[in-house]
Image (cartoon, helix red, strand yellow):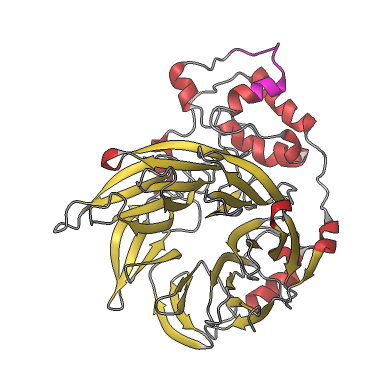
């Protein structure tokens, strides 16, 4: 998702209470200054995580504007429409005056550029760890006669046994083995699909590109017509309904990723006879990606576990109190360049406590490079709702994640897609199946699919699509790339006749 890797230095809180001054800090080291100024709103980024070139030309100019400084040629107002400019100005993201003097800023610049490496080598030896994807059969699925694809959402409706697939202005439903059930034209870009109480819930982001304007909408489909459930949302990317307080009236919960601003919010229906909803912000911050509704502390109230990208790069638990109030607890946090993309709640070690697996790999913004810290991370839950790091598996550009016992041997396997793989030697790692060989030692064997055109997907769904008793996987192809790509590969993706890659599990065959 666009925007999750740039370094957001929002210093309004410091300015309000007067912690910052215009004096230089000659006795302070660059690291101390970074801890003071950069650590206010996010974890302090490690200078060695990016190259000197990336810091100097891409990240530091963005950081500077959040401190009221012009450094380099970055202009956040460049090429904005009048409406976008007005919205950004009203948000007061950028200080009108510098919050540090030139000497202090230069110390920060020197700390990052002098500490950072000149280059970050690609670990091409990873190719040696990969095995053939023998457990799954690769089945391309063509949904239309148009070449290329931009699949933005996938959802399997197990009740009706059909797969829903979204592209900008299009919505398909498809049944195994080869039946196209519906082909809708939509005035929307749907990025999330859920079914609830037999109703299809579609989340229209409004615009895929970063925007400060609330143009998103949550729709349902009723009698083959779109019905708006909630509008004027700020780039929502994930929505579902749930009766959080068990009063018989479900709430609509939305993760509005936004851009400079955003929120995790719920919309409460006023009464059984009045469908009008009122907005309640659970957490006022950009970058909300995904959430689960789960009782996390055993008090028989439904809590919300949410993943945030952007500057937060965090997992929060929102514990429900009385009258649908929530108390936030941050349980995981990462540096802002990590590019948090997806997570799942699971019980990996079967101890009855929820664990968290998540992937880092967003690479579309100011720090594009092959990052060694991208990949899959597993954190085991404790009874006090804290989490302990257990396992890391590096995968460049890891984007989507599914977890299940795919080979039915009693332990959890992982499936990871990468929208930003290293293309010169590791293009096959655009999809990695991690077969669990010894769960308590975290020993996995990696399997990749060898396809004529590499998988390139922003979506990954699991389901038993052929109803043979094991879990299959499906990925939606995307022909577009926001990052550099060889011309031959770009042309191949744009002319590929299929939109889906179905990975049919052969375990029970």
Residue 386 % position (x, y): 54, 38
Question: Looking at the picture, how far across and down is residue 227, in whole percent?
Answer: 28, 68
Q: Of 38 and 450, which appears nearest the observer? A: 450
Q: Is residue 447 above or below residue 63?
A: below
Is residue 24 highlighted in magenta? yes
Magenta-highlighted residues: 23-34
Whether residue 149 is situated above or below residue 83 in the rendered picture: below
Q: Residue at x 60, y 31 (%)?
A: 64
Q: Quadrant of the N terminus?
A: bottom right
**Residue 168 vs residue 322: left or right?**
right
* The quarter of the displayed image where residue 456 is located: bottom right
Q: Is residue 476 visible?
A: yes
Q: Identify which residue is drawn at 62% across, 41% down.
A: 388
Q: Number of labelled discs?
A: 0
Position of 412 relative to 327 (above/below): below
Q: Quadrant of the C terminus?
A: bottom right
- Left or right of 330, for residue 321: left
Q: Which residue ends up furthest to the bottom in the rendered image? A: 178
Residue name at image x 64 percent, y 62 percent:
411
Residue 110: x and y in percent read: 74, 26
């Amino acid at each position: 998702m666009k925007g999750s890797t740039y370094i957001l230095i929002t210093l309004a809180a410091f300015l309000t209470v007067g912690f910052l001054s215009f004096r230089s800090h000659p006795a302070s080291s660059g690291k101390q200054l970074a801890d003071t100024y950069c650590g206010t709103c996010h974890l302090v980024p490690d200078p060695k995580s990016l190259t000197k070139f990336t810091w100097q030309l891409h990240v530091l100019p963005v950081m500077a504007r959040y401190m009221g400084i012009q450094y380099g040629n970055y202009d956040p107002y460049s090429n904005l429409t009048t409406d976008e400019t007005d919205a950004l100005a009203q948000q007061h993201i950028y200080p009108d005056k510098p919050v540090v003097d030139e000497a202090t800023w230069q110390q920060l610049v020197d700390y990052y550029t002098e500490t950072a490496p000149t280059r970050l080598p690609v670990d091409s030896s990873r190719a040696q760890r990969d095995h053939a994807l023998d457990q799954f059969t690769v089945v391309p699925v063509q949904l239309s006669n148009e070449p290329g694809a931009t699949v933005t959402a996938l959802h399997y409706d197990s009740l009706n046994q059909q797969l829903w697939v979204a592209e900008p202005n299009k919505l398909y439903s498809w049944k195994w083995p080869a039946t196209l059930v519906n082909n809708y034209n939509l005035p929307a870009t749907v990025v999330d699909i859920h079914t609830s109480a037999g109703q299809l819930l579609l989340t229209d982001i409004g615009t895929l590109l970063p925007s400060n304007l609330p143009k998103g909408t949550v729709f349902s489909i009723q009698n083959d017509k779109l019905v708006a459930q909630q509008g004027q949302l700020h780039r929502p990317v994930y929505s579902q309904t749930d009766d959080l307080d068990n009063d018989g009236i479900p709430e609509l919960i939305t993760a509005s990723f936004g851009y400079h601003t955003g929120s995790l919010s719920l919309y409460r229906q006023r009464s059984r006879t009045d469908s009008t909803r009122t907005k309640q912000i659970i957490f006022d911050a950009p970058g909300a990606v995904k959430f689960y509704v789960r009782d996390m502390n055993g008090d028989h109230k439904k809590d919300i576990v949410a993943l945030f990208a952007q500057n937060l790069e965090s997992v929060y638990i929102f514990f429900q109190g009385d009258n649908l109030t929530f108390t936030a607890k941050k349980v995981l946090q990462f540096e802002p360049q990590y590019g948090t993309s997806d997570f799942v709640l699971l019980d990996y070690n079967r101890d009855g406590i929820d664990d968290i697996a998540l992937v880092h790999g967003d690479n579309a913004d100011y720090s594009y490079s092959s990052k060694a810290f991208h990949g899959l991370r597993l954190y085991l839950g404790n009874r006090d709702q804290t989490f302990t790091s257990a396992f890391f598996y590096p995968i460049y550009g890891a984007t989507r994640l599914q977890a299940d016992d795919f080979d039915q041997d009693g332990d959890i396997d992982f499936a990871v897609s990468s929208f930003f793989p290293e293309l010169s030697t590791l293009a096959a790692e655009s999809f990695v199946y991690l077969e669990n060989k010894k769960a308590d030692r975290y020993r996995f064997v990696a399997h990749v699919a060898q396809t004529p055109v590499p998988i390139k997907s922003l979506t990954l769904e699991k389901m038993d699509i052929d109803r043979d008793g094991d879990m299959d996987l499906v990925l939606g192809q995307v022909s577009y790339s926001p990052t550099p790509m060889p011309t031959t590969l770009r042309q191949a993706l744009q002319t590929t006749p299929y939109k889906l890659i179905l990975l049919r599990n052969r375990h029970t065959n």
